[in-house]
Image: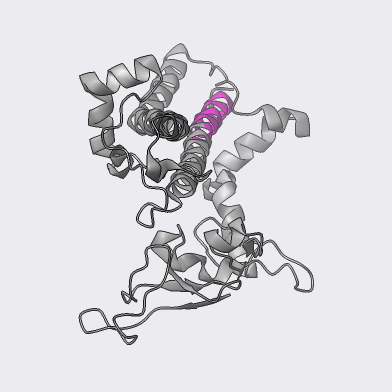
Amino acid sequence: MKSRTLQHSNGPPKQPLETVYCICRRPDTGKWMIGCDGCDDWFHGECVSLQPTDEDLVDQYFCPGCQEKGFGTTTWKRKCRLPSCHNAALIAGDPPSKYCSPEHGIEFFKSKYPLADYCAGEISALAGAVADASGFRELGNDVPAPGSTNSRADIESLLRRDVEKLEPQKDAINRRKNRVGARSKFISMAKDRQKRVGDELRGEGDQTSKGSKEICGFDIRLAMDDEEFADWCESEEGQGVFSQGILNGREGLCTKRKCEKHKYWLRIAMEDIELEERLIGERSTALLSEENGLRQRQNIKSLMENQRLR
């Protein structure tokens, strides 16, 4: 795998203007690029859904064209387990590690181990409240009732308040899920229309439609950003499309057979959907972990109150 980032931003590119690269067939723009180990062509990271932070994690890179021809598949090095780190894990180290360094291993477990931030009294209350490992695992499922009714009400009120603070973030995650679901359904409808219109054009005797190659099938609405697409989905036209589950007509449809402009649009669109779904899943897991942490902390407060009232 090879990559480069040219330093110029306003001046002319170092390569001649007529030299073009990538699936976009444009010159070197000065942005980060990655070289294909199959065809030796260079690709803008943003055109093939790769980021500069992926550079150290790519083992061998094969562009979409080479993958389609069966020349090879992009392989990746194992990423450091710490989410914020983009370095490769030391799996070949002695001993092997899921982290890029011992420091990142410690940092990961600190982030996953809420007791690391508790005071000595809280830890003591937690340890004294359970008799075995099974009891420890069940901590946080319910808030134990303190001896005082008022104390219990206060603790439960604090828990509800803290959990409610997470609701806006949960709502935002749900909106993202709905948008991704709508885009995924739209892509599926666009794919169906690609084949249907191609068959229609062949049936109409369109001379440009002869042959077995499918039409491009790109729909201009696929270029909308999230806000624009959400607005379109709420429009009368969008609601009609999703209600029927089919894209009728040919307005905004690219019917070219050899379209360089929209080449690989379906592959790129599906990769964007998969990435967004993965990010949503990670954020949902983080919110659930945060909520569980709040419940566990309130649980410990309740246990401490029990001990105080004994």
* Residue at x 53%, y 19% (from the top left corner): 146
Please provide the residue range marked out in magenta: 292-307
Relative height, residue 35 to residue 262 (above, below): below
Q: Position of residue 169 (x, y in %)?
A: 36, 34
Left or right of 147? Residue 181 is left
The answer to whether residue 55 is seen in the rendering is: yes
Q: What main secondary structure does the magenta stretch of the protein show?
A: helix
Q: Quadrant of residue 19?
A: bottom left
* Residue at x 37%, y 63% (from the top left corner): 24
Residue closer to the observer: 117 or 293: 293
Whether residue 303 appears in magenta in the rendering, the answer is yes
Relative height, residue 235 to residue 13 (above, below): above
Left or right of 260? Residue 40 is right
Whether residue 198 appears in magenta in the rendering, the answer is no
What is the residue that sits farthest to the top in this orientation?
A: 149
Left or right of 110? Residue 96 is right
Q: Position of residue 36 (x, y in %)?
A: 55, 71
